[in-house]
Amino acid sequence: MSPTGYPDYPTSLLYPPRFTAFKPPSAAHRENEWFDEVMSLPCTMRAGRTKAMVMLAVLVLATTAGCLSNADDEGDASPITMNVHYDLTAGTITERVQNGAVLSQNGVELSFDFARVTSRAGSITTLTLDPGDDEDGSNAITVNANEQAEITYTYMTHGLFTVRLSATDESGNMASIDVVVRIDKEIDWTDTNTNDPDSMVVATAPDCACPTPERIDVDSTIENPNDLIASPRAEVTWHLNDPSGEEQAFHTEQIGEGQEASWTHSQYDVDAGDWALNVTIDSGNESLNLHHVVLIAYEAAETEPNPLTIEEAERREDSLSQ
């Protein structure tokens, strides 16, 4: 209580309030027309309008950011369009072996047409094909695009090869694509007039850093020709041994004079190395004729061919004639 008997009053009433009255924004703060409009609204409407304007600003920034990102992505993309055509991406090497001597070997020839490779940054200057059948790229072929538009390569070894096709333009830009090609191998092997058949070696190690063959297909026929003197039937056994020498498959037949017997077999789970197809004469002392056809086959994992269509060829001719 005060000396006068009246209740005490807060001393804060003796001082002016510390908060200041609301001051309208200065002209510098009202450079945007929408600010004046917002400030003229009641507080509740002003808050809602401000929130809407903030959301609009966020959307505008997001849209702009997307445009800038797309522009950057386009700037990083190569101006070269790798429109390469090829009719084949698989083939089989054939080899003929007679009485231990290699008579012939035919490789697989694959061609790649770069004629429709273009660049937005200038003319194409060089074309390159790396067949993927060596470790250091020494078998790669590079040609002058002004002189040659097609590159051909002949495979002489089996495997699933990754071919790299590349092009460079006059501005120094480069682009490339990869094409997987499958090269199998078939060996036609004969051993004639023998009573001690040779061993047929089947080398399954691929000539690339790629999977081993999917299977070995054996199609073998043994003939017991007629002799001047009659002799008993011959009993023979085929043996297919893996690189460690372990037998993986076998088959036994009896063959009379003037007759023949056959064995077909598909061997899966093929390890890389030298397999052996052996024939033993279990009984009889006959001179036999052996004929083996062995296929080293890979999984059909090659790239689909991309042949030049008639429509594309016609469009190309029209563009050149204009």
Image (cartoon, rainbow, N blue to C red):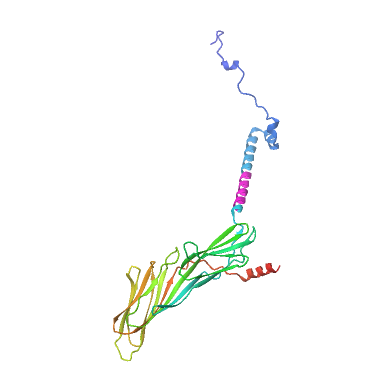
Placement of the C terminus among the 4 image quadrants: bottom right
Q: Quadrant of residue 203?
A: bottom left
Q: Nearer the viewer, residue 156 or 262?
A: 156
> Farthest bottom residue?
228
Residue 95 position in % (x across, y down): 44, 76
Image coordinates of residue 151 in percent, x first then y, are 56, 68
Q: Is residue 243 placed above or below 188 in the rendered structure?
A: above
Magenta range is 59-73
Whether 146 is drawn above or below 232: the answer is above
Residue 159 in view in this figure: yes
Residue, x 64% and y 33% (percent of image)?
43
* Location of residue 178 in the rendering, given as x and y in whole percent from the top left corner: 53, 62
Give the percent coordinates (x, y) of residue 31. 70, 35
172 and 78: which is toward the camera: 172
Relative placement, left or right, of 283 versus 315 is: left
Q: Residue at x 47, y 66 (%)?
A: 160
Helix, strand or loop: magenta stretch = helix
In the drawing, does residue 302 fall left or right of residue 222? right
The residue that appears at 38% across and 73% down in the rendered structure is 201
Towards the viewer: 133 or 1: 133
Residue depicted at x 62% and y 71% = 310
Q: Is residue 278 magenta?
A: no
- Number of residue marks: 0
Residue 64 belongs to magenta span = yes
Is residue 269 visible in the rendered structure shown here?
no
Would you identify the image quadrant in which residue 312 lies?
Answer: bottom right
- Residue found at the very far top of the displayed protein: 3
